[in-house]
Amino acid sequence: MTWSEMQPLLEQACWDTLYMVGWSTLIAVVGGLPLGILLVLTDRGGLLQNLVANKVIGQVVNIARSLPFIILMVALMTFTRWITGTTIGVEAAIVPLAVGAIPFFARLVETAVREVDHGLVEAVQAMGGNTWTVVRKVLVPESLPSLISSTTTTVVALIGYSAMAGTVGAGGLGDIAIRYGYQRFETGLMWITVAILAVVISLIQFAGDYAARSLHRRGAHAGPAPKLRLLKAAS
C-alpha cells in the first residue's frame, strides 16, 4: 500500500480516535469527579459520613474497574444499541469507553481529594461554610494539579481502550491496525499506527504534566494569602 493510499485512512482514523477519546473523557470527568468526591465525603470522618453508602459505591466502582474492557464492550452491547441505535462505529464505542472510564477516573479523583490539607476543610467549616462550600472552595481547587494529572492518565488509558475497541469495528487507529495491519498483512501501515499512537500519547502526557506542574508552582508561590481570601469568602 502506497502512502497516497494510507494517508486518507490514517487521517480519518486519527480524527475518529480523537472524537471517541474526547467525548469519553468529557463524560468520564462529568461522571467520575462527583463520584470520587462522594467516596471521600461519605467515608469515615467525612463531611457526609455514611459507611453503608460508601461501601456500596466503592463496591460498584471496584466491580466496574475489574472488568476487562473487551468484556465490558460485549456486556454493554444492548445498552449501547439502546443509546446509539448501533453497536459498531465511533458513536457506539463512546458508550463502553465512557462507562469504563468513569470508575477509573473516580478512584483517581478520590486519591487526589484525600491529599487536601484537612486543616483547610476545618477552617472553612469553622467560618460557617457548608459541605458544598468546602467542595467548591477547598477540595476541588486544592486538588486541581492532581486532578489534571488524573485526567491525563485517564486520556492515555482511553486511547489504549479505543485502540482495543477497533477489534469490534469501532473505527479509529485500532481498527486500521486490525483490518489492514493484521488481517491484510500491511505491516508498514500497522507500525505507522503504532507510531502515531505513541506520539499522541507522548504529547498528551507532556501537556498534562506541564499543566499540573504549572498549577502546583502557582499554588506554592502564591503563599497563604489566597487561602485566607478563600476562608473569608466562605464566611
Image: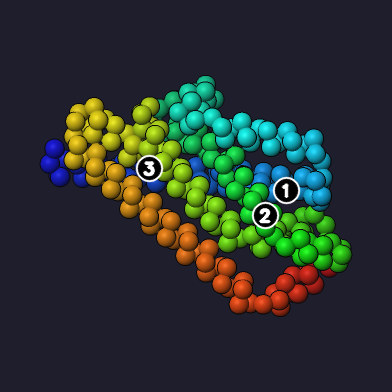
Toward which corner of the image does residue 176 lie, by quadrant? top left
Q: Which residue is drawn at 72% across and 72% down?
A: 227
Q: Earlier in the sequence, mark 3 or mark 2?
A: 3
Mark 2, residue position: 113
State the CA–CA distance, disc 1 to disc 2: 7 Å
Q: Name the residue under label 3.
A: 17
Residue 39 screen position, x and y as percent: 71, 44
User: Mark 2 falls on what kind of element?
Assistant: helix
Label 3: element kind? helix
Q: Position of residue 221 (x, y in %)?
A: 60, 77
Q: Nearer the viewer, mark 1 or mark 3?
A: 1
Q: In percent of the image, x 48 and y 61: which residue is there?
A: 209
Residue type (three-letter) at the residue carrying disc 1: Val
- Residue 3 position by quadrant: top left
Circle 2: residue type: Val
**Marks 1 and 3, how far apart at CA:** 33 Å
Q: Residue at x 70, y 36 (%)?
A: 57
Asked whether disc 1 touches disc 2, contact meaning CB atoms under 8 Å apart, the reply is: yes
- Circles 3, 2 touching at the beta carbon (< 8 Å): no
* Colour style of the rendered protein structure: rainbow
Tag shown at residue 90: none
Residue ID for mark 1: 40
